[in-house]
Amino acid sequence: MPRPILATIDTSALAHNLQTVAYRLAQDASGPPPFIWAVMKSRGYGHGMVAALAGFSQADGLAMLDIDEAIHCRELGWSGPILLLEGFFEPADLEILTRYRISTAIHCAEQLDMLESGPVDCPIDALVKLNTGMHRLGFQPGEYADAFARAQALQAVGVLGSLGKMTHFARADDDPVVTQAQLDCFQSITRDLPGMVSVCNSAATLTPGLASGLSASNGQWVRPGICLYGASPFADQSAESFGLRPAMTLSARLISTHTVPAGEAVGYGQIFRAQQPMRVGVVACGYADGYPRHAVTGTPITVDGVRTRLLGRVSMDMLAVDLAPVPSAGVGAPVVLWGQGGPSVDEVALSCGTIGYELLCAVAPRVPRREI
Ligand SMILES: *Cc1c(COP(=O)(O)O)cnc(C)c1O
């Protein structure tokens, strides 16, 4: 029997979440709601490309980073738009973009140089990225008009196809004032330039004041990622409160149970010590599976459908749980680390000082995945 750990990917939850986001946008929109790029970077936030593609078959487009992921989507039969959020990295990539009809972000002058010197036999669709305060990728406000003019010249000679404009928010999850300032900057710089527009990640997409008024008839596209997987972009609002469903359930089983005498400690470093005799279960999941080693005693976990807590330090291949709330649980009892029937990935992330994104992306290749 293989080691009892499994990541179950519910493609119907992915489809449900996409629909939920589309429905919210439709309620807020004055005209037809904005188009949706379903963000699938990092192999669909750890869910796997095949599952993500199955779940997002109704998306207007798919956005990702890696050219190989994009090719994989084409080979799996996706014929709609694909956007590379970091664009291309070297001249040799351009031929692949044309061959597979992949759209690209253009965020730096070096990419324009490559387009100006490389032969391109079929126009590439592109979004020119403005840095409105994230200071990661994108042209500075003062450089943008020149960059866009260079892109338009490339369009005139058939190197670029449709052109658009994009930016990325730094604090859409926690600071509406900063976000509004970024949006104002974006609008003042790009207002008179033609083409499609894409600004909103999950947090902005789920913030009514921001996404409302966006419309496909103005060529507007949103770019939600995390919410489509059923996790929340916000620290203080659960995914469930938006009607989203977790798409990944990380489950395992108890492989041992025993009673720890009073005064004895559990696991490496002996950081958890029993005050009284207590039943402890050992779960076949550790940090080499992607479960965070920084999770603290008390991190929620479900055993046999009952919520209990992690004890002591997470080992490479195992972790320990408190069986006091579930005295009947024995070897083989089902454990949910996060997902359906267990704590949310965001709750677990909170107990180890990170965000659900990191945990979903970090599930290790050795964990078998099953799609349902
Ligand atoms: C990752 C990413 C997104 C999606 O972000 P979420 O917070 O997961 O919704 C959107 N746009 C860009 C440029 C990104 O890198």
Image (cartoon, rainbow, N blue to C red):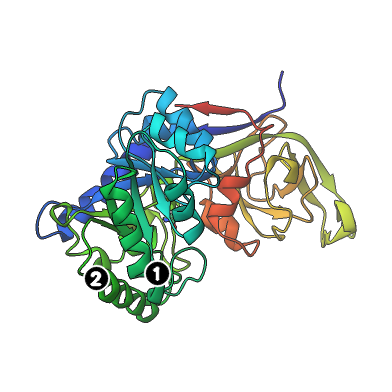
In the picture of the structure, the residue carrying the numbered disc 1 is 172
Amino acid type, label 2: Gly
Relative placement, left or right, of 36 versus 352 is left
Horizontal side of 306 relative to 192 (left or right) equals right
Answer with mark 1 or mark 2, whichever residue precedes in sequence.
1
Q: Which residue is mark 2?
A: 209
Question: Can you say which quadrant of the picture contains the N terminus?
Answer: top right
Identify the image quadrant of residue 38: top left
Name the residue rendered at 40%, 69% in the picture: 172
- The reply to whether the residue tagged 1 has its Cβ within 8 angstroms of ligand 1 is yes
What residue do we see at 46% from left, 42% from top?
118
Q: Is residue 27 above or below residue 93?
A: below
Percent position (x, y) of residue 268? Answer: 87, 53
Label 1 sits on a secondary structure element that is loop
Q: Quadrant of ligand 1?
A: bottom left
Q: Residues within 10 Å of mark 2 (few under 14, many from 20)?
A: few
Q: Are marks 1 and 2 in contact (CB under 8 Å)?
A: no
